[in-house]
Image (cartoon, rainbow, N blue to C red):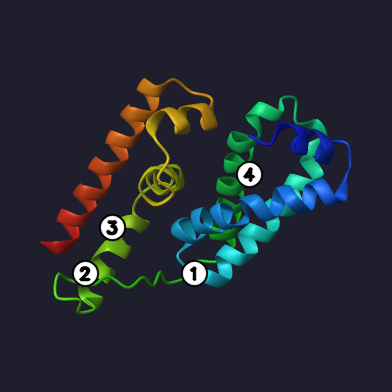
Amino acid sequence: MDGGLVERARAGDADAFDELARSRINSVYRTALAILGSPADARDATQETLVSMWRGLPSLKSPEAFDGWLHRITVNSSKMTLRRRRGVREIELTDDAGETSAHVASDFDQAFDRLSVDQRALIVAHHLDGLSVSEIAVRLQIPTGTVKSRLFTARAALDSALRDGSG
């Protein structure tokens, strides 16, 4: 954790903010991209997240809560972008032989789009960003049991949406 860096950025140190933003920008972008599906929209949400981060840093009470706080800002910025723009998700999946499967990607996109933004963010944090259940719990400031339950529900919703879309 970059507690000292967060403290300096909270105090208005632009260099500390720049360093903090650079260290988190890839994670913010990946989360926004997974939620929004559009690189352009993800860039917009990432930019909004960084602006909100700069504006909100002075009011952040605990530097230890920074990553969870930033995650919530990212999800909220993505929600706002999603409300403004309803884009088409494009991802590329390959089958076991390395062949691109547009049909599978389309089915997954449609199923993923049926999930709530919070469910998408949780799946991204765990499966794309590789965060453990306990890391997510710390980030979101909720019990690990709650993370497990929400992750189970998100996976079940994705599975159900995939089954509904393929029938």
Q: Is residue 33 left or right of residue 2?
A: left
Work out whether 49 lies above or below 146. below
Q: In the rendered structure, which amino acid carries the disc numbered 1?
A: Ser
Q: Secondary structure at mark 4?
A: helix
Q: Secondary structure at mark 3?
A: helix
Residue at image mark 2 = 104
Q: Quadrant of residue 40?
A: bottom right
Q: Earlier in the sequence, mark 1 or mark 4?
A: 1
Residue at image mark 4 = 73
Q: In the rendered structure, which amino acid carries the disc numbered 3?
A: Ala
Q: In the rendered structure, which amino acid carries the disc numbered 2?
A: Val
Residue at image mark 1 = 38
Disc 3 or disc 4, which is closer to the eye? Answer: 4
Disc 1 or disc 3, which is closer to the eye? Answer: 1
Q: Secondary structure at mark 1?
A: loop
Res 111 label: 3
Q: In the rendered structure, which amino acid carries the disc numbered 4?
A: Ile
Contact, mark 3 vs mark 2 (Cβ under 8 Å):
no
Disc 3 from disc 2: Cα separation: 11 Å
Disc 1 from disc 4: Cα separation: 18 Å
Q: Residues within 10 Å of mark 4 (few under 14, many from 20)?
A: many
Give the residue displayed 35% in from the left and 21% down from the top. 145
